Amino acid sequence: MHNVKLFILLNSEAKIRLLEAFFCLGWGRILKALPFAMVSPLLGNQSEETSSQITEKNIHVLKHISESIEIMSRYTPWDSQCLVKAIAGQKMLRRRHMESTLYLGTAKDANDELIAHSWLRSGSYYVTGKAGMRKFTVVATFAMRTNSGKSVGDYHG
């Protein structure tokens, strides 16, 4: 009940962004359930990365998206781990005509078992999955570019 009260106190922009994050996490979960060969073309240009340039104006937007995904991932009735979060972030950024690169990485855990992680970067800002990413070897990248394929510049919306 406390969380409902907090939600009510938020401004309308924050409420909309949280609801958007919830639905994008749902989309990410649906994609995660499909065969990866079907999903990978939707993630962007494989084996490419977007620019690491960023503007101050975009950092504000990126932080809000990152926070919204992190908050809402705790309240989904489905599993919303790293890949689901990265796909959700990518979708939210694409709606704002902002480029991103989704990374897939692997590593070995303490029991020598193979583990995987994914994270999302826009400019030099890590939108999702930053924690622990340095332990993983990148095995795939997917660059989601704007429609023009050029740098996105400032977000104006």
Image (cartoon, rainbow, N blue to C red):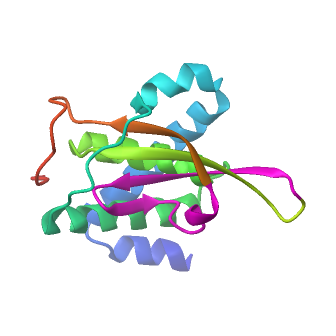
| Residue 134 screen position, x and y as percent | 57, 64
For the point 51% across and 27% down, the residue is: 40
| Residue 42 screen position, x and y as percent | 44, 26
In the image shown, does 123 or 92 lie closer to the viewer? Answer: 123
Q: Is residue 104 left or right of residue 95?
A: right
> For the view shown, which residue lies furthest in the top direction?
38
| Residue 142 screen position, x and y as percent | 43, 36
Q: What range is drawn magenta here?
A: 112-136
For the point 53% across and 80% down, the residue is: 2
> For the view shown, which residue lies furthest in the right direction?
111
For the point 15% across and 43% down, the residue is: 151
| Residue 129 screen position, x and y as percent | 53, 60
Q: Against 102, is 109 above or below?
A: below
In the image shown, does 136 or 91 lie closer to the viewer? Answer: 136
Q: Is residue 110 left or right of residue 14?
A: right
Q: Is residue 157 left or right of residue 86?
A: left
- Count the labels in the image: 0
Q: Quadrant location of residue 101? A: top left
Residue 122 colored in magenta in the image: yes
In which quadrant will I find the N terminus? bottom right
